[in-house]
Amino acid sequence: MDVDRYDPQQVEAKWAAAWEEQGLYRADESDTTRPRIYALDMFPYPSGDLHMGHLEAFSGGDVIPRLKRMQGHNVLHPIGWDSFGLPAENAAIKRGTHPKTWTYQNIDTQRATFHRLGISFDWSRTFNTSDPDYYRWTQWLFLRFWERGLAYRKASPVNWCPNDQTVLANEQVINGHCERCDALVEKRELTQWFFKITAYAQRLLDDMAELEGRWSDKVLTMQRNWIGRSTGAEVDFTVVETGAPVRVFTTRPDTLFGATFFVLAPEHPLAERLVAGGPHEAAFRAFRERVERETEVERLSAERDKEGVFLGAHVVNPVNGEHIPVWAADYVLTEYGTGAIMAVPAHDQRDFEFARKYGLEVRMVIQPTTDDGTPVPLDPESMTEAMPGDGRLVNSGPYDGLPVPEAIARITADLETRGQGSAAINFRLRDWLVSRQRYWGCPIPIIHCPACGEVGVPDDQLPVLLPEDVTDFKPKGVSPLATSARFVEVTCPTCGGPATRETDTMDTFVDSSWYFLRYTGLDPDRPFDPDRVAAWMPVDQYTGGIEHAILHLLYSRFFVKVLHDLGMVPFTEPFSNLLNQGMVVMHGAAMSKSRGNLVEPTAIIDQYGADVARLTILFAGPFEDDVDWADVSPEGVARWIQRVWRAVNTAAGGQGAEAAEAGSDLGLVRLAHRTTRDVTDDLERFRFNTAISKLMVLTNGLGEALRNGRGSAAERRDAASRLVLLLAPLAPFVTEELWRVLGNTSSVHLARWPDHDPELTRAESVTCVLQVDGKVRDRIEVEPEVGEEELRSAALASAKVQAALAGRPVARVVVVPPKLVNLVTGA
RNA sequence: GCGAGCGUGGCGGAACGGUAGACGCGUCGGGUUUAGGUCCCGGUGUCCGCAAGGACGUGGGGGUUCGACUCCCCCCGCUCGCACCA
């Protein structure tokens, strides 16, 4: 091996093969003494080769397991593939192949790139969610949910992607567009399978307390908003004309006396009944049809005018017996609350806009005040916007004068006493729609029997395999599975009569909601071994993109809570700590083939090697920040790795042209120890960019000592060893090779992480800043343990300080040994 | 509109309330080399100055402090998330 020039290609290939052969990174199930760490990266979808986002995520995700292994932990760091999904079908349609072919080819490609990158995976427990050995257990879990009523089928208006010809979960609709293909999503009334995640809304919210500080505030806030808990009251109104009750949900029961009209969602069943056969029927019908034709985006656009029609009916306000008109309007949503509201235009902006447009009464029931609390006269006519804030009640009969919070409590209690309402909590979260009309997914293990109804496929008949005889994967709105008679036509497991199989497949987010449990051991007889799960879970460090903030991360939390209730796992949260890497973009835009700005990790590896590829992306900036590849160059770290190579080789063997050793160099020793302390600290806090910069400083310091003939042979070797060990989690290949250069025979990745001597982390001397009135006027070198008095007199002795003082008396002296003296003059 | 975050050299970015700009890119100068590249050394926030030195400087304005990139208030700009949720 050339000591002047490091050749990554040859070295990396050698070690990648050796590590794999030795199973170097396997978790040890038999060892019960070492503390266990479960480090997990969000598994990839095999859409091609790994992209730059993967390079960043997996490079960062590999640091902690490598560090912890060296610190003596028993580490589980697994990998697999989230391999069901739509792109496989689209590729199959385009190429005329089977989705499976495309998927498994891509998995092979990605696996090879992972090996080249040298990520420390335990390859003995890898799997794909599209393997029958895996999806059998996805089906098994579905049946456990179904038995408990947590998986159910119902007809409801659902999100329909006209391009992909399948339904979508609410979480997969982004601003009214399909998450996958960006097509405008439509609403359709369909019978679909749901998971009852709403039953866990409160617990999903409550348990976030234990994730506080361990997950980013951003993700926690997003989940909190998505679950969207509101407290208030449900209040029963009565239709004057028919006597029928109609319920509303409100967060402001204190404003009940300000309700001047009543609004139903256009789809509310009562609306249809109220207008039937009357003079308003035609207008209402026309209105509703127009609303239904609108896409989600149009309807939800906040800028556009609210529209509605009067239904010719009235309701009785339960608090004051007033009759108020009933309207249907597009700003009231059928899915939220009860699909009906009491409108209080004076104190709700939406109601206000609607009232102004249609000339409806605005009545103030909260006393407005000036900034200093002085009441101002009520003047609803001149209002230009609603007044949603706090205050005391007016125009509210017996409740006048009460502050808002108290009024809410009192009015709610009184409604309850009279049987006209009750305190209520509402969530924005909807049940999770899990069925898909597509081929490449996990079949739902249900049989529809004309005599017995829905029947679960018995456990011993799992897995329900995807039919192999399906050839047309084009989306047609009905699952392609329905085209296989052999798949569909079955006998009922309960009565033996003719029956049909469910042909929808599951959302792929079901597959990924429990995969982390399966990695604890590929149990042939169960989804997972509870003892092993208890030993490894929850995941100590979960690394992945923030784009899953509410999809995968919410669903997985829900799954684990259900499994906890089923007695299958002893914990209620799957991921103790979450780390989200930023995005990798190019000139500010997402990288993509169509934009032509794609940079592929394999291209970087070909040119510079895997170590440099990993270091480059981690050095580019804080791990959680976005990286613009246009701003990044691997040249700097490539040069640095060459410097590391030469310095360690020289320190190890004395080869090379550098000067011979001289006496002891305490400065080098101290630098090595300080770097040990700081890099350990940085890595544990995921500050990879600053860890790398400190390792560069150590490399430069060692190189200088070698060139200038400073330091004993032992000191140089120690500094070189530390450099190699500290760099090992970031650049596994070159460090493995250098570890041998230093005379070791076993892997650096199983070597003990270095300690530092606190005594030796002290600097030899410190620069002390001398300030006059906060401005730096001089700098002096002092010993780290210099005394306060000594500093004070040194400062006053400085000619530059005296010049700056210009004879003015010193009123105060601030001394911060050993770093700073500030002389404050009067005034 | 609501919520969160961020504004530091030509660029990516460093800075427990205590030397602003670590480290790297780029660039300029020098050395090695037949040359190019590599490698090595040095300079590189702005302005004034031959220099010594000085003034200014972390989006803008105010405040707290002996001392503010850092803490507080207001404003401007950008990014992300949610967005008619009653």
Image (spheres, coloured by chain):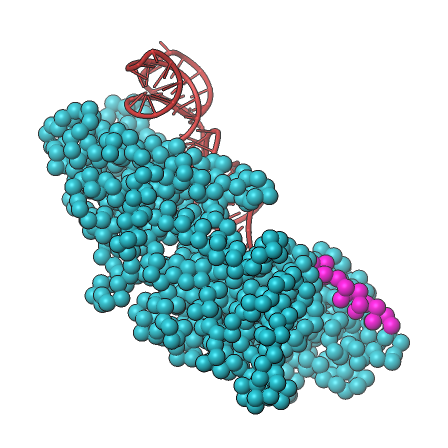
Tell me, what hue is chain B?
Answer: red
Taking the image as shown, residue A496 lies to the left or right of residue A23, namely right
State which quarter of the image contains the C terminus of chain A: top left
Whether residue A207 is visible to the viewer of this picture, yes or no, is no
Tell me, what hue is chain A?
Answer: cyan
Find residue A447 and report its image quarter. bottom right
Taking the image as shown, residue A637 lies to the left or right of residue A781, namely right
Give x and y (percent) for residue A564.
Answer: 41, 76
Q: Which residue corresponds to the image point at 71% horizontal and 55% vertical from the top-left? A: A303
Q: Is residue A290 magenta?
A: yes
**Depth check, front residue: A682 or A617:** A617
Taking the image as shown, residue A474 lies to the left or right of residue A39, namely right
State which quarter of the image contains the N terminus of chain A: top left
Give x and y (percent) for residue A580.
Answer: 44, 54
Kindly give the residue lying farthest to the left in the view shown. A663
Looking at the image, how many numbered discs can be counted on the residues? 0
**Depth check, front residue: A366 or A603:** A603
Give x and y (percent) for residue A146.
Answer: 52, 80
Find residue A474 and report its image quarter. bottom right
Taking the image as shown, residue A131 lies to the left or right of residue A362, namely left
Residues drawn in magenta: A282-300
Q: Which residue corresponds to the image point at 57% horizontal and 85% vertical from the top-left? A: A492
Q: Examine the residues drawn in magenta and state their main secondary structure.
A: helix
Identify whether A313 is placed above or below A552: below
Find residue A426 and report its image quarter. bottom right
Give x and y (percent) for residue A32.
Answer: 22, 67
Q: Which residue corresponds to the image point at 43% horizontal and 34% vertical from the top-left? A: A633
